[in-house]
């Protein structure tokens, strides 16, 4: 058992009642389904005090907004998007179409077809996540998605210029200044002025996440998202100050964000706690980071790195930062994580903002069964088959007839039977008087 230097408060003490969120979201989505643009406008006025003549930004208006930004901001956006685009392109290049001949004249193939229309949600509010535009829109465009409709909310009645610039430079085909459940509902169900999408991507608050959950099935979604998570694995060679800073870097996402340290050094663990307690009072985002650390922070001490890797896998954390002498060991030792960040020269914040891997990652243990958003999420992997050799079709027909009858699917069996009869003269007892066989 690990030595626990800091543990979170019991789950039941911090569990929030999600019933109100679910019911409120359901009511808004139904209102949008019935009321269309009128309902969208009503909720935009209510939640964002925002009711322009059109929620969609025109090309001319987008150009005006870009002109208000310092050149350095635009250059930085373009730099980051090059990193994201390069990595996404390598992902796309790894996915190939193919066709194989498995029996004489039996051709089986696979194709990757881009989704037709994607809705990209880029959060605003307190934290306008400009980087989410890179992650959702650039990746979709590399996948070949022909139409991307992007939404972001106004911030206290103002246009978030840097976010709009990021959406435009990423390649969004339509940009709407619209946020929250009303944006998700409009994209998923369509209105008089907003065409419905086939898949929704991008992070958001609890209401946005719940809206995506409820709409899943009507549209595809990227991931079921929860609070941001960080888990650091550190040995006695790690810098405790760096560990403390990195844990707090993710705790500032929100008061529900878990920040976990698993270390082989009790001394390091205690120093990390001391540094965090010293850093928090002056941290500009302490109103989020402090309760996150207080309620969801953990520091655990284990005997060996083998134990650390095994314990970390049970968390299946969104972000796992490995600050050890040999960080690349984690690539062989671990299987459950959204993203690995190896060595002191790397950090989760790089992944969030600049390095090029996608920051939309699995949370709440879902890394046990899925990875994060990637170019393949925007592709439909489909198959096709063609049998042009009559002898092979007859052989498959005979096997199909037997296999289908084991499952009591007589209709399926007969589809196989008729080909065996037509191409190889096999008997057809269930239609002996109506089908003459070959040449019919």
Image (cartoon, rainbow, N blue to C red):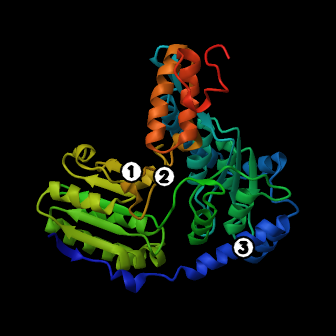
Label pair 2/1, CB-CB below 8 angstroms: yes
Q: Position of residue 253 (x, y in %)?
A: 48, 67
Q: 275 left or right of 382?
A: left
Q: Position of residue 210 (x, y in %)?
A: 58, 69
Quarter of the N terminus within the rendering? bottom left
Q: Secondary structure at mark 1?
A: strand
Residue marked by disc 1 = 339
* Residue 386 can be seen, yes or no: no
Residue at 60% over, 76% down: 22
Which comes before the other along the chain, label 1 or label 3? Answer: 3
Residue at 28% over, 61% down: 314
- Furthest residue to the bottom? 13
Q: Position of residue 159 (x, y in %)?
A: 73, 61
Which comes before the other along the chain, label 3 or label 2? Answer: 3
Q: Secondary structure at mark 3?
A: helix
Quarter of the C terminus within the rendering? top right
């Amino acid at each position: 058992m690990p030595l626990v230097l800091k543990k979170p408060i019991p789950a039941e003490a911090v569990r929030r009642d999600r019933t109100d969120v679910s019911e409120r979201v359901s009511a808004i989505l139904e209102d949008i389904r019935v009321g269309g643009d009128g309902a969208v406008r009503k909720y935009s006025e209510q939640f964002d005090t925002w009711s322009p003549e059109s929620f969609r930004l025109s090309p001319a208006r987008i150009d005006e907004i870009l002109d208000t930004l310092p050149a350095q901001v635009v250059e930085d956006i373009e730099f980051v998007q090059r990193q994201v685009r390069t990595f996404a392109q390598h992902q796309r290049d790894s996915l190939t179409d193919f066709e194989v001949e498995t029996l004489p004249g039996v051709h089986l193939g696979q194709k990757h077809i881009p989704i037709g229309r994607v809705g990209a949600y880029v959060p605003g509010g307190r934290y306008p996540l400009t980087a989410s535009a890179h992650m959702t829109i650039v990746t979709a465009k590399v996948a070949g998605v022909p139409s991307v409709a992007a939404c972001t909310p106004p911030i206290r009645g103002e246009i978030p210029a840097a976010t709009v610039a990021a959406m435009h430079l990423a390649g969004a085909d339509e940009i709407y200044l619209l946020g929250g459940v009303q944006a998700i509902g409009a994209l998923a169900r369509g209105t008089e002025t907003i065409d419905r999408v086939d898949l929704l991507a991008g992070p958001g608050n609890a209401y946005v996440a719940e809206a995506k959950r409820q709409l899943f099935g009507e549209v595809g979604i990227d991931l079921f998202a929860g609070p941001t998570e960080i888990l650091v694995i550190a040995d006695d060679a790690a810098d405790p100050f760096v560990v403390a800073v990195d844990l707090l870097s993710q705790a500032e996402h929100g008061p529900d964000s878990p920040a976990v340290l698993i270390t082989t050094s009790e001394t390091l663990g205690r120093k990390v706690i001391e540094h965090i307690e010293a850093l928090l009072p002056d941290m500009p985002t302490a109103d989020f980071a402090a309760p996150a650390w207080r309620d969801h922070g953990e520091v655990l001490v284990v005997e060996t790195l083998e134990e650390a890797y095994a314990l970390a896998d049970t968390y299946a954390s969104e972000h796992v930062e490995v600050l050890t002498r040999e960080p690349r060991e984690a690539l062989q030792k671990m299987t459950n994580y959204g993203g690995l960040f190896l060595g002191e020269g790397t950090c989760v914040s790089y992944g969030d903002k600049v390095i090029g891997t996608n920051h939309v990652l699995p949370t709440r243990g879902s890394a046990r069964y899925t990875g994060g958003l990637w170019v393949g999420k925007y592709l439909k992997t489909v198959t096709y088959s063609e049998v042009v050799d009559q002898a092979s079709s007859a052989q498959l027909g005979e096997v199909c007839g037997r296999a289908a009858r084991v499952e009591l699917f007589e209709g399926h069996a007969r589809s196989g039977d008729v080909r065996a009869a037509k191409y190889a003269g096999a008997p057809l007892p269930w239609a002996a008087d109506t089908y003459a066989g070959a040449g019919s």
